[in-house]
Image (tube, helix red, strand yellow):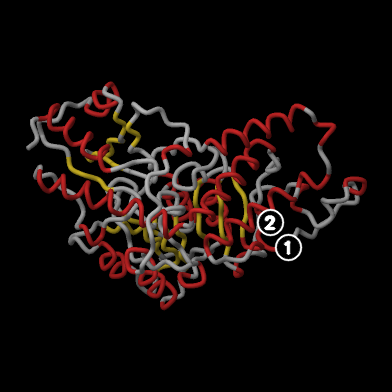
Amino acid sequence: MNSTSSAEIDVQPLGCQRDAFELPDDICWLNTSYMSPMLHAVREAANAGVTTRATPWTLTQEDFFDPADQIRRSVADLTSADADGITLVPSVSYAMAIAARNIPVAAGQNVVVVREQFPSNIYPWRRLTDENKATVRTVQFETDDWTESIIASIDGQTAIVSMPHVHWTTGTQFDIVRIAEKVRAVGAALIVDATQSLGTLPFDVSEVQPDFLVASAYKCMLGPYGLTYVYVHPSWRNGVPLEEGWLNRANASDFSQLTEYCDDYMPGARRYDYGERSNSILLAMAIASLKQIQEWTIPRIEATTRPLIEQIVSRADAAGLWHPPLEHCSPCMVGIGLPGEAPNDIGKQLAQRGIYISVRKGNARVAPHIYNNSAEVDRLFDTLQELTSVG
């Protein structure tokens, strides 16, 4: 699997998979970019995880390690990575803190970010640059081709480029392969936040070669809240973790010898795993969601959602509403401009009618997934017309 869009190859869409989710018939949930509804299989796995936690006498030493390693293998399979390169952390901010702790930034250098990036991908770089007399360089996007603007902002003084694969308010998809080439050419590090894309949009780490790839489990990955998957490039697998946990040590699997303190870490990126990562509930949910994505495959998921994005853009055009150019729209979500006469509580009014989107920076962020269909897109725009007198 590579980062080539499935729109460029012949992939059969899945069709609407609503029956696989905990989603009432009257709810029009176009808000995966906020949080996905739960798969029936994930709820069942959560219940099984609760049972496991309720009966600790059934736990074995293997239960502290095997489920986590199963998740590593699944995430690696979905990203063309190696399982040793996957670490499990609680959040994007935690992952960014790992990167900030390990990637050096010198005085006078810059860290490139994009305008109106999600805060978890901004605050660590503000601190890091302040501490090292460096600067945060924010790309402002003066043309519709945001990729070109980012590439033009990277220079010989750039230490880090930290950016999303898909912009979290507009749905703009960046050409991450081209950006990665420029990053490598100047000797900088690339950190990609794929929280709003991984699971719907293919990503091949062997092609992109990011230093860190980060994705929370609870959006397009259809998994639990409180777990984030991180790929770590081999260059950084001997780095310094945020925690010095016992689970990450080479002798951790021998519970009888834990006081034989060990300075060596477990192999690969496992040294960065967070404490108490062996949560039977979260891991069971993650395993179930990853299994379903593997069965559906990311290219077929994308082939199912992309026509819905194209329909959203078409309806927005008919209503005279702004959106990113279609050629730069991701299959994950799209931001459409709201008309000036839209009520301030437009999101709340839509929710009262059973239609759910997010409103971010004046945009209606519409994020369909494989549980949606074209009738729901029409329902959204027909209701927007009713509430705002949009054409």
Is 175 left, or right, of 50 in this rendering?
left
Q: Amino acid at mark 1?
A: Pro
> Which sits in the foreground, 85 or 190?
85
Residue 156 position, x and y percent, is 38, 74
**Residue at 16% in and 33% down:** 382
Residue at the image point whose x is 38% and y is 44% from the top: 16
Rendered view: 139 above or below 349: below
Residue that badge 1 annotates: 267
Q: Secondary structure at mark 2?
A: helix
Residue 7 versus residue 42 in the image, above or below: below
Residue 51 horizontal side relative to residue 360, left or right: right
The x, y position of residue 151, in whole percent, is 31, 69
Q: Amino acid at mark 2?
A: Arg
x, y percent for residue 84: 66, 63
Quick check: 265 above or below 8? above
Q: Quadrant of residue 112?
A: bottom left
Quadrant of the rendering where the C terminus is positioned: top left
Local crowd size for mark 1, using a 10 Å CA cut-off: few (<14), some (14–19), many (≥20): some
Task: Find residue 190 and report its horizontal and vertical position in percent.
Answer: 46, 65
Q: Is 163 left or right of 105, judged from the image as shown?
A: left
* Residue at 45 percent of width and 70 percent of height: 208
Indicate the quadrant where residue 34 lies.
Answer: top left
Q: Nearer the viewer, residue 188 or 302?
A: 302
**Residue pointed to by mark 2:** 270
Q: Residue furthest bottom?
A: 185
* Circles 1 and 2 in contact, beta carbons < 8 Å: yes
**Label 2 neighbour load within 10 Å: few <14, some 14-19, many 20+:** many
Which residue lies at the image location 63% right of the left edge and 56% below the top edge? Answer: 72
